[in-house]
Amino acid sequence: NAGVTQTPKFQVLKTGQSMTLQCAQDMNHEYMSWYRQDPGMGLRLIHYSVGAGITDQGEVPNGYNVSRSTTEDFPLRLLSAAPSQTSVYFCASTLRGGADTEAFFGQGTRLTVV
Amino acid sequence: DAKTTQPNSMESNEEEPVHLPCNHSTISGTDYIHWYRQLPSQGPEYVIHGLTSNVNNRMASLAIAEDRKSSTLILHRATLRDAAVYYCILRDWNNFNKFYFGSGTKLNVKP
């Protein structure tokens, strides 16, 4: 059981470039989410999905796209990278929605936009 | 966001118990109390959660005050691998996707 796997671990982009951050889970979880972690800001929700084919925006969705074609995968696309998107990105999954669920996080992707 | 207050840092000796406190005086009746920890350059890791009653699992125990305005995470025998930043967060049913981690408590474990 690998849990939640994120790739790549590190990435440097030039302003204006696009890229996809990959996230996969092997626990058959319904819910998957993307967060960014910045110093002093905690975790901020970017996008989330409640199941295959269903996605919705979180607190800070601008500049990011997601899709969920399978239960296992939830990629995050940066359309045109900006320095403000320099951050650590975490993907998380839960078996279902709810305040009483355990969230599993990936190891993170450290992104630098220059 | 419902806020929690934790000490910035704590220190413990290896193989001794550690009590990590958290104040959450504005907690609502349906908020769950969760604890996560994060090692350097790692993703957050779930530790334990509870609503009203004390909870135990293989990693830790969670003691919840009767008025629910505070809680304590108990690591029964600290190891060097337990050195991390510990976050106490509240999750409510309307915003369960939100994790307000705040600054947490940095636990240092001395050999």
Image (tube, grey):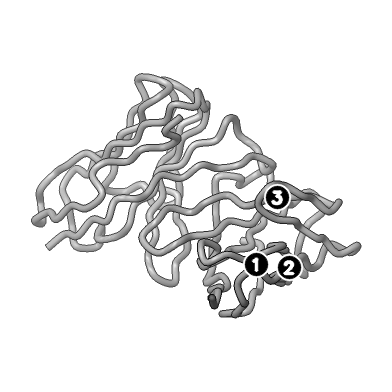
N-terminal-most mark, 3 or 2 = 2
Left or right, A29 with respect to A61, comes to: right
N-terminal-most mark, 1 or 3 = 1
Q: Secondary structure at mark 3?
A: strand
Kindly identify the amino acid type of the residue bearing the numbered disc 1.
Lys
- Chain under callout 2: B
Residue picked out by circle 3: B49
Q: Is the residue marked by circle 1 packed among few (<14), some (14-19), or many (20+) residues within 10 Å? A: some
CA distance separating discs 1 and 3: 16 Å
Q: Is the residue marked by circle 3 packed among few (<14), some (14-19), or many (20+) residues within 10 Å? A: many
Residue A104 showing in the rendered view = yes
CA distance separating discs 1 and 2: 6 Å
Residue picked out by circle 1: B3
Seen from the viewer's position, the closer of residues B16 and B21 is B16
CA distance separating discs 3 and 2: 14 Å
Labels 3, 2: front one: 3
Kindly identify the amino acid type of the residue bearing the numbered disc 2.
His
In terms of image quadrants, where is residue B65?
bottom right
Residue picked out by circle 2: B24
Seen from the viewer's position, the closer of residues B104 and B109 is B109
Kindly identify the amino acid type of the residue bearing the numbered disc 3.
His
Q: Position of residue A78 (x, y in %)?
A: 22, 44
Left or right, B16 with respect to A71, comes to: right
Residue B22 showing in the rendered view = no
The mark found on residue B39 in the picture is none
Q: Position of residue B69 (x, y in %)?
A: 81, 67
Residue depicted at 42% across the width and 30% down the height:
A25
Q: Position of residue B111 (x, y in %)?
A: 54, 75
In terms of image quadrants, where is residue A74?
top left
Residue depicted at 52% across the width and 72% down the height:
B103
